[in-house]
Amino acid sequence: MSLIEVKAVSKIYRVSDEVETVALDQVTFSVEKGEFLAIVGPSGSGKSTLMHILGALDVPTSGSYRLDDQEVGDLDEDTLAEIRNQKIGFVFQAYNLLPRTSALKNVMMPMIYGGIKVKEREKRAKQLLSQVGLADKLNHWPNMLSGGQQQRVAIARALAMTPAIILADEPTGNISGQQVTEIMDRLNQLNQAGHTLLIITHDQEVAGYAKRTLTLKDSRLVADNVNGRQR
């Protein structure tokens, strides 16, 4: 059984009775536990829509998305929220950190919703920030950190609930140079430690870190390559 199974998934946005936009068209693939996969394609190819579906932020118009053997499209909003908190760690391009909150408390936030006790939240958050090299920045607000440091806080936060999947949407989109290498090395280390990692990116250099690449074009999956070779 695959961790993720996507079968003939389509997503159609209806603007009116006569106008509709096909954002995804009959997309099928699966992901095994521990894979490192990049989803690439030009703007408008369906990457963001697919990310929202994989992250249980949206459901398909048709087709099947099973996560850990659960049919996501059949779940109510409370269960979807629980999946987002418990099974998926999100890393966003814009970091999405609370601006007037310390790095430590930002990392603790998912654990509050997860019902983790205060002492355990603080202990785990300190450990995670140490793992991403920010043990000396616990009390820093986001505006006191570089872009790369903010993204490392976001990675620590994504790991707070020990999720089955880390879903990173353009994780290097707002940083450049050495900081890109720094973030991708951190993500690669997480994959080597056993985390399943999915990255949405338009950057071929970033995609090159992944062991497998899915390419979307015009809302369809047009290529599925492992180490540069078509599956």
Image (spheres, helix red, strand yellow):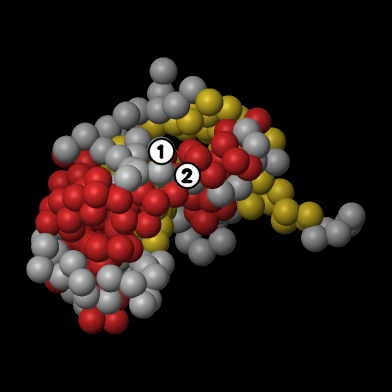
Q: Which mark is residue 87?
A: 1
For disc 2, the neighbor class at 10 Å (few under 14, some 14 to 19, many from 20) is some
The answer to whether 200 is drawn above or below residue 94 in the figure is above
Mark-to-mark CA distance, 1 and 2: 6 Å
Estimate the x, y position of residue 39 in percent, counting from the top left.
41, 49
The answer to whether residue 8 of the structure is visible from this angle is: no
The answer to whether residue 41 of the structure is visible from this angle is: yes
Q: Which mark is residue 84?
A: 2
Where the N terminus falls, by quadrant? top left
Question: Residue type at mark 2?
Answer: Arg
The answer to whether 89 is drawn above or below residue 169 in the figure is above
Estimate the x, y position of residue 114 in percent, counting from the top left.
41, 44
Pick the residue in front: 174 or 55.
55
Residue 25: image quadrant is top right
The secondary structure type at the circle numbered 1 is: loop
> Which residue corresponds to the image point at 23% horizontal and 54% vertical from the top-left?
122
**Taking 170 as reference, is 64 left or right?**
right
- The residue furthest bottom is 143
Question: Residue type at mark 1?
Answer: Lys
Estimate the x, y position of residue 127 in percent, counting from the top left.
15, 51
Pick the residue in front: 21 or 81.
81
Q: Are marks 1 and 2 in contact (CB under 8 Å)?
A: yes
Q: Which mark is residue 121?
A: none
> Which residue corresponds to the image point at 39% horizontal and 61% vertical from the top-left?
92
The secondary structure type at the circle numbered 2 is: helix
